[in-house]
Amino acid sequence: MEERHDPLSDLLEIQALNVLPMPVLVIGEGHGILYANTAAEDFFQASALVLKRQRLDDLVAFGSPVLGLVEEVQRRGASVSEYRLELASPRLGLDRIVDVFASLLPSQPDAVVLLLQERTIAEKMDRQLTHRGAARSITALGAMLAHEIKNPLSGIRGAAQLLEASVGDDDRLLTQLICDEADRIVKLVERVELFGDERPSERGPVNVHDVLDHVKRLAQSGFARHIRFSEAYDPSLPPVAGNRDQLVQVLLNLVKNAAEAIGQDAMDGEITLTTAYRPGIRMQAPGSGARLALPLEIGVRDNGPGVPPDLHQLLFDPFVTTKAQGSGLGLALVAKVIGDHGGIVECESVPRRTTFRIRLPLHEAKPSQVG
């Protein structure tokens, strides 16, 4: 008797694949894409409808080992796993290290389920802890600088102002230069001093979209008035646990960096602000063994030239910058503030596509006191 096909079983399989936080593709004959889950849409930056009109060959580089992996599963009829494969896609600007798990779809023996687990997620979290430690390592330096440098600078500036009244016009330019440079050093020291501020900040539920809209208005009225903004928001995103003013400062910093990367002369500059709910990402909370869920994702993406490869790993370290006049403290401060919020910040960059992603915990309402 011919075995009857159960469409309900297929539906349950597809629903199970869709809730996985890792990218999943179902590959059919000729490497055609039969299905892509939500995580795969995000990973390949394309909708499921667009992906299903393509072949796996269109998504990965020519000769990619992923193609051979699919063919091996189809030929042997057995599951195959490969670790630390380089997944390159020049068309999409992807170049990532992934673990690949491939097996046959039970209800469709000629179809292969391809699950991708990005190795760089764990590596980014490890680097994030390093960045956080690097930011905090200059806390004592900030306090020392405030005392040992700001006071003498005040004396130098005062002496220059006194000299200014008794010298000629040519020498007055020099005294003004002394005052300007003293002021510049004080501003730099004050920025470093922020790292020494360990006072607990007031936190509560924060609407991320309100923060992003506020940042966008500030940017469009000033440094980014020549740049087009677009949004891709998850409207159902719950509140984040944080300090609104600090999150505004962090996101304003990232948007300003994006605008400066695009440049003043760019005709097609675009910054995209995104939010999403990404369950399944956890990390250990500093100072405890508790695992903290980081499901809220905020993204700032620009189409500038990208971060130089040799600086990518050091981007959040203090005093590392790509700007001729930069201090290299902006992103280090971003890492510290987000770390203090229990989150992580990461960067992915290729030419014409640089994305900073912030992952933060949910705000959990405390039960009301009864008494």
Image: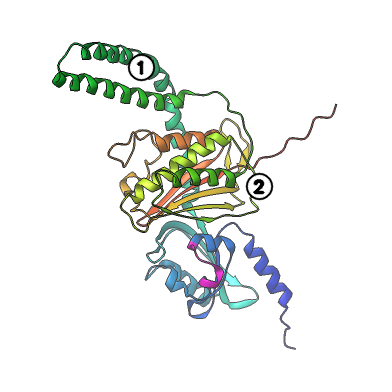
Mark 1 is surrounded, within 10 Å at the Cα level, by few (under 14), some (14 to 19) or many (20 or more) other residues, namely some
**Closer to the camera, 134 or 53?**
53
Q: On the rendered structure, is 324 left or right of 245?
A: left
Q: Which amino acid does label 1 sit on?
A: Lys
User: Which circle's residue, 1 or 2, is located before the other in the chain?
Assistant: 1
The percent coordinates of residue 160 (x first, y second) are 24, 14
> With respect to residue 229, does 244 lie above or below?
above
Residue 178: quarter of image: top left
The percent coordinates of residue 232 (x first, y second) are 54, 57
Q: Which residue is drawn at 40% across and 24% down?
A: 190
Q: Residue at x 55, y 69 (%)?
A: 48
Residue denoted by label 1: 150
Q: What residue type is labelled 2?
A: Pro
Is residue 48 located in the magenta-colored stretch of the structure?
A: yes
Residue range highlighted in magenta: 44-50
Residue 11: quarter of image: bottom right
Is residue 338 located in the magenta-colored stretch of the structure?
A: no
**Closer to the camera, 64 or 19?**
19
The percent coordinates of residue 46 (x first, y second) are 50, 66
Is there CB contact under 8 Å for labels 1 and 2? no
Q: Is mark 2 on a helix, strand or loop?
A: loop
**Quadrant in which the N terminus appears:** bottom right
Q: Can residue 69 be seen in this view?
A: yes
Residue denoted by label 2: 238
